[in-house]
Image: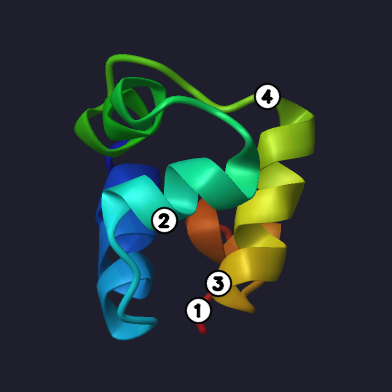
Amino acid sequence: MKIFQKRLKEMRLMCRLTQREMAERLGISQPSYIRYENGSSEPTLENLAKISEILDVSVDYLLGKKEY
């Protein structure tokens, strides 16, 4: 899942979003979002889909299945 963590953080920074802003958009706490980026937790399928929409990338890209 390390590729997910890396791409999640990279894309969030490219979109100039803070961890707090991502958490708010997902409707979760900031600590919950931070766990996605550090790999101690994985998002639900629903939140994974929301993340891809927020960051304007495919789920496949976030999961390392294809390049941007």
| Mark 4 secondary-structure assignment | loop
| Mark 2 secondary-structure assignment | helix
User: Circle 3: is it few (<14), some (14-19), or many (20+) Cα within 10 Å?
Assistant: some
Residue located beneath label 2 in the image: 21
Point out the frontmost of discs 2 and 3: 2
Mark 2 or mark 1, earlier in chain: 2
**Above or below: residue 37 compared with residue 65:** above
Measured in 3D between alpha carbons, the distance from the residue under mark 3 to the one under mark 4, in whole angstroms, is 16 Å
Measured in 3D between alpha carbons, the distance from the residue under mark 2 to the one under mark 4, in whole angstroms, is 18 Å
The amino acid marked with disc number 4 is Thr
Residue located beneath label 1 in the image: 67
Residue located beneath label 4 in the image: 44
Measured in 3D between alpha carbons, the distance from the residue under mark 1 to the one under mark 3, in whole angstroms, is 15 Å
Q: Residue at x 30, y 80 (%)?
A: 16
The amino acid marked with disc number 2 is Glu
Q: Return the x and y of residue 20 as percentages of the image width and height.
A: 34, 47
The amino acid marked with disc number 3 is Leu
The amino acid marked with disc number 1 is Glu
Mark 1 or mark 3, earlier in chain: 3
Q: Residue at x 25, y 54 (%)?
A: 6
**Above or below: residue 50 compared with residue 37:** below
User: Circle 1: is it few (<14), some (14-19), or many (20+) Cα within 10 Å?
Assistant: few
User: What is the quadrant of residue 39 in the picture?
Assistant: top left
